[in-house]
Amino acid sequence: MRNKAKLSYLQFVNELEQNQNRKHDAEEKYYHKYEGYKSYGIRNPKFNAILKKYRKSFRELEAREVFELATPLYSSHIAEQMHAGNYLIRLHIKLITPQKLNFLDRVADYFNSWSIVDDFCINVL
């Protein structure tokens, strides 16, 4: 991962960790009963505010950096990071060409919840 993408990832994940809400995470497990579901438990309004804060830096990424940043977001298997991966790809949707369909196929292997799949289908596809 290039320095800019790596720095963006580390800063973003640090912000998510600082806003973790264990109580809400426990409540969300009611809806996500399958094994392996991980979340910071950040409520949607707060999560959307965090995404908005990083929007400019995400938009400034070069094409290669977009995919370098999206990969660890998806591979984390943590709900908020995976939703951020969808958000990042949506910001750069013009980069999704037939040559990048194999990238989408690879990251789809990380999808582990209905909410990630729904978000991806609605906002990326």
Image: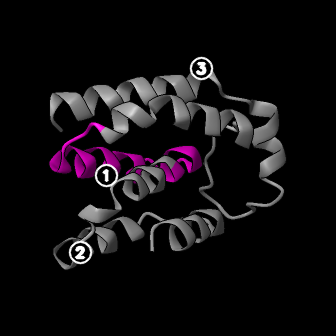
Q: Give the range drawn in magenta.
A: 60-83
Compute the Cα span from label 2 to label 1.
Answer: 13 Å
Q: Does the magenta stretch include residue 62?
A: yes
- Note whether residue 43 is visible: no
* Coordinates of residue 87 in the picture (x, y in percent): 47, 52
Give the CA separation, mark 1 to mark 3: 22 Å
| Quarter of the image where one finds residue 105 | bottom left
On the rendered structure, is 102 left or right of 19? left
Q: Which SS class for mark 2?
A: helix
**Residue tagged by mark 1?**
71
Q: Earlier in the sequence, mark 1 or mark 3?
A: 3
Q: Which mark is residue 18?
A: 3
Residue at position x 22%, y 73% from top? 97
The residue that label 2 is drawn on is 102
Relative to 20, is 67 above or below?
Answer: below
SS under mark 3: helix
Which amino acid does the dot numbered 3 rest on?
Gln
- Disc 3 crowd, CA 10 A, few/some/many (<14, 14-19, 20+): few
Q: Which residue is at the front of the view, 100 or 39?
A: 100
- Which quarter shows the C terminus? bottom left
Tag 1: Cα neighbours inside 10 Å, few (<14), some, or many (≥20)?
A: some
| Quarter of the image where the N terminus is located | top left
Way the structure is coloured: one colour
Q: Marks 2 and 3, Cα distance to the nearest angstrom? A: 34 Å
Looking at the image, which residue is at 31% across and 52% down? 71
Kindly give the residue lying farthest to the bottom in the view shown.
98
- Pointer 2 or 1: first along the chain: 1
Q: Residue at x 64, y 60 (%)?
A: 35
Q: What residue type is labelled 1?
A: Thr
Across and down, in percent, residue 77 comes to: 49, 52
